[in-house]
Image (cartoon, rainbow, N blue to C red):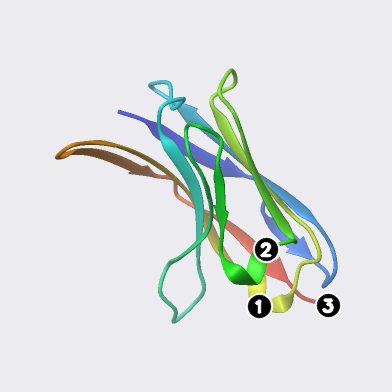
Amino acid sequence: QVQLVESGGGLVQPGGSLRLSCAASGNSVSSYALGWYRQAPGKQRELVASIASSGSTNYADDVKGRFTISRDNAKNTVSLQMNSLKPEDTAVYLCNARWSFLTRVYEYWGQGTQVTVSS
């Protein structure tokens, strides 16, 4: 079992920055793909950014160039640096850890942290 706890959310003005962190416990996530998703009211959950165990990254088109995902396997954490924030980035941001091999899949979610971008 893996437990994920997010932190770093809050209220920020448009153009501002926030850094989200997700701490994993219960097991090492160094072999997991880690990701950040977000869900705004009335909208489906969507992938924001992901980072594979190899370190390769993937971003949603609307955050490319503004957000950066990183992982620290020694600390069992994944972070999301968010710059140039826009009101449309407002959502609950959730941390995800996923491991799969053939038909075996282990997937865990955090509880989420609220990010509000507003003046």
Q: Residue at x 65, y 78 (%)?
A: 88
Circle 1 residue: 88
How much space separates mark 3 and mark 2, taking CA atoms? 23 Å
Drawn side of residue 49 relative to residue 10, left or right: left
Residue shown at 63% from the left, 72% from the top: 62
The percent coordinates of residue 35 (x first, y second) are 49, 48
- Which circle, 1 or 3, is nearer the viewer? 1
Q: Identity of the amino acid at label 1?
A: Glu
105 vs 87, left or right, is: left
Q: Label 2: few (<14), some or many (≥20) within 10 Å?
A: few
How far apart are the alpha carbons under marks 2 and 1?
A: 14 Å
Viewer-closest of 23 and 78: 78
Q: Are marks 3 and 2 in contact (CB under 8 Å)?
A: no
- Residue 71 against residue 44 in the figure, above or below: above
Disc 3 vs disc 2: which is toward the camera?
2
Image quarter (top left, top right, bottom left or bottom right) of the N terminus: top left
Q: Residue 3: x and y, percent?
A: 40, 33
Q: Quadrant of residue 63?
A: bottom right
Residue that mark 2 sits on:
64
Going 45% across and 49% down the picture, which residue do you hit? 111
Q: Which element carries disc 2, helix, strand or loop?
A: loop
For residue 62, the mark is: none
Q: Mark 3 — residue? A: 119
Considering the numbered disc 1 on the image, is that residue within a helix, a strand or a loop?
A: helix
- At label 3, the amino acid type is Ser
Please state which amino acid type lies under the numbered disc 2.
Answer: Lys
Q: Secondary structure at mark 3?
A: loop
Q: Nearer the viewer, residue 13 or 82?
A: 82
Find residue 94 and report its horizontal and vertical position in percent. 49, 53
11 and 70: which one is in front? 70
